[in-house]
Image (cartoon, rainbow, N blue to C red):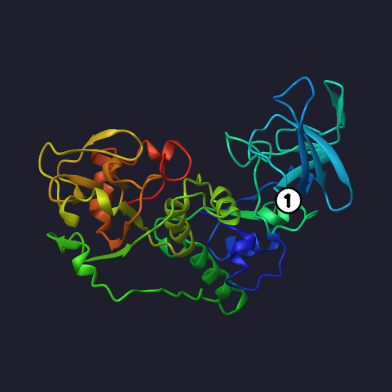
Amino acid sequence: MKAPLQWLKEYIKIDLKPEVLADKLTMAGLEVGAIEYHGKNISDVVVGKIKAVERHATKPDILICQVDTGIKILQIITKAKNVKMGDKVPVALHGATLPSGIKIENRELHGVESFGMLCSKVELGLADSAEGILILDKDTAVGEDIRKVLGIGGAVLDIDVLPNRIDVLSIIGVAREVGTILNRKVRQPIIKVKETAEDIGKAVKVLVKDNALCPRYMARVIKNVKIKPSPEWMQERLVACGMRPINNIVDITNYVLLEMGQPLHAFDLALLKEKTLIVRKAEKGEKIATIDGEKRDVSGCLVIADTQKPIAVAGVMGGANTEVVDSTKDILLESAYFDPKTIHKAETENGVIHKIRQGSGLGRRGSRA
């Protein structure tokens, strides 16, 4: 369990050095195996605002940008195609260091001087690939240290959680433990839900056929969503905790999982046959293509199904046939309790979860069912 210190501080007052806090947690029985410093290899990278953009006289694929860094306007060259006047972007100044070990220096390219570099998520060590320069929110302050803007550079406690301590498999759970050790009150998040008068029973039907394996299944319909990247601060928290950002809907399910320890799963409502969810045991020979791209035999597993087929392995992973994609408009959000033994059985006998744990976070598309 990875717990960023800055995230913990939202729920409890912490004025100890990371090493001191880690020692106190370990001595109390919650062993901190390591302390990581996410983004520690970044220096002299600030927020810049692009004041002007023009193409190179002989190399049209090269853009010459005039960038306000809060101290002075710098001329910086880039081949990125996604920047335009008015954008706010990360700027690595002369002498800056990046996670890859690269040190930025002023240079001349095709007869034009460049005094720094515009950065993508790749240069900042926040992603393995990127389509262009990272475009920041328009309200971001020019000249601000990028580590502060993105919430990176702080300590992350890597906690070795024993099987009997599932109560600390969340940021709030760790905050409660810290509160007990320091005798301080934990601040719970304030949750507000905007509801409509529409009866959810008219939008979707949920049928639980095995109450012993699923004693509680809750669902909520959310309409007119817009699929887009989640806010940068949320993406950086997910990355610090070892998860890969996907989109705003998948990311928020993973965020809540990390924050509260409650798994959520979002289905594309339009892809549910007859707008019906059925929690049942899979029949012998039933198969499902899961969100990691694998086709799996789920015979005997507890599954979530519509009226025609399984669409998720309960408590383990969602199906590709109802996953949230760019065209999704309405979602059904699941929050449920599944018997732990049936989840473990699905994981061990069918190997459903095995491939996920070889990669980052919870797999190719993110959330558990």
Q: Is residue 211 visible?
A: yes
Q: Position of residue 61 (x, y in %)?
A: 69, 25
Q: Quadrant of residue 53?
A: top right
For this view, does 108 lie left or right of residue 367? right
Up/down of 262 relative to 341, above or below:
below
Q: Describe the element under mark 1 as helix, strand or loop.
A: helix
- Residue at 52% x, 71% y is 176
In the rendered image, the vertical position of residue 174 relative to residue 234, given as above or below: below
Residue 51: give x, y in percent of width and height. 79, 46
Residue that appears at 69% across and 42% down: 84
Answer yes or no: is residue 314 visible: no
Q: Residue 106 vs residue 271: left or right?
A: right
Percent coordinates x, y for residue 2 in the rendering: 55, 53
Based on the displayed image, in which of its 4 quarters is residue 99 positioned? Answer: top right
Q: Which residue is mark 1?
A: 146
Number of residue marks:
1
